[in-house]
Amino acid sequence: MSYSTLLTHLDNGIFTITINRPDKLNALNAQVFTDLDHAIDEVYNNKEIKSMIITGAGSKAFVAGADITEFGGLNKEEAMELARRGQVVFFKIENSKKPIVAAVNGFALGGGCELAMACHFRLCSDNAKFGQPEVNLGLIPGYGGTQRLTQLVGKGKSMELQMTAQLVDANEALQLKLVNHITTAENLLPKTIEILNVIMSKAPIAIGKIIECVNVAVLSDSSYNNGKSGYAKEIESFGDCFITEDMKEGTTAFLEKRKANFKGK
C-alpha cells in the first residue's frame, strides 16, 4: 500500500515507516495521522511484518511537532476531536503486539516527542532533541504527552520540562531514560535493526505478552485491562504462554541444548 506522507519498506520482517514531509520538518498533519493509522493496520494484519521502525525523512527532524497551520479557527469540540484522533493512533502503536521502535533522527518536539513515546522504546542519533514546548503556544500536549512523559521520566521532571518548554539533548534524554541508546546518525537504523533482529529471534507470542504486561504496569487507566492489576495480567499471560507451541519448542530446545525454532503458534 502506498501513502502520500509516508515511505514504507519491508525487509526481513522489519517494516520501516519514514514520515516524509522534510520540507515541513515532518510535522504531523491530518493526512499523516490517516496514513499512520492505515500503516499500523498493516502491522497488525500482515503476517510477514514481525516488527516496525518509525523514523523521519532527512537529517534535521524525526517529527518537529504538529502542523500548527491546521489549528487555526478550531473550537473546543474540534480541538478535542483533534487530540482524540491523535491519541487513538498512538494507542494503536503502543498496544501493538509486535514491537514498534522509534529511531529518532533530529528534532522530536511536541507531537513528535509524543509519537516517539508511544513506541515501545526509542533510539536516537547524537543530534536529537526532545521536548514538549506547547506552552509556548498557549497549549498543552494533546496526544498523550502529559501522561507518557510522566511515566518515562517521573512527575517532577515531567512537570519541569512541560512548564518550561525546555528541550532535552540526546545525552540528557539517555540519562532521563527517555531513550535506550544513542548512536551516530549513520548508525541509527543499523543499530535499531540489530536490536529488532534479536527480539525477532524470540517467541512472538511471548513478546506480545511482555508488551501487554509492561503496558499495564505503566498505564494509570485500569479500564485498559478491565480493572485487572499488572500482577494479575502477568499471571494470566504466563498461563497463556504454556498452551503455545512456542513454549513447548523453547523448553525442549533448552533441554536438548539447541537453538529454538519459534513459529508464533
Image (cartoon, rainbow, N blue to C red):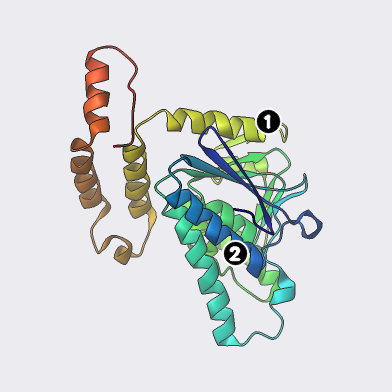
- The image position of residue 182, as x and y in percent, is 63, 35
Task: Categorize mark 1 by other alpha carbons within 10 Å: few (<14), some (14-19), many (20+).
Answer: few
Question: Which residue is label 2 attached to?
Answer: 33
Farthest top residue in view: 257
15 above or below 89?
A: above
| Residue 156, disc | none
- The image position of residue 240, as x and y in percent, is 21, 43
**Residue nearest the viewer, comparing 224 with 20:** 20
Secondary structure beneath label 1: loop
- Left or right: 264 in relation to 23: left
Badge 1 amino acid = Asn
Badge 2 amino acid = Phe
Distance Cα–Cα, label 2 vs label 1: 28 Å
Secondary structure beneath label 2: helix
Q: Residue at x 53, y 38 (%)?
A: 14
Task: Categorize mark 2 by other alpha carbons within 10 Å: few (<14), some (14-19), many (20+).
Answer: some
- The image position of residue 263, as x and y in percent, is 33, 32
193 above or below 35?
A: above
20 above or below 65?
A: above
Question: Which residue is label 1 attached to?
Answer: 187
Q: Residue at x 24, y 63 (%)?
A: 227
Q: Residue at x 71, y 68 (%)?
A: 67
**Residue nearest the viewer, comparing 251 with 121:** 251
Where's the C terminus, which quadrant?
top left
188 above or below 17?
A: above
Mark 1 or mark 2, which is nearer the start of the sequence?
A: 2
Q: Does the rendering let one see residue 256?
A: yes
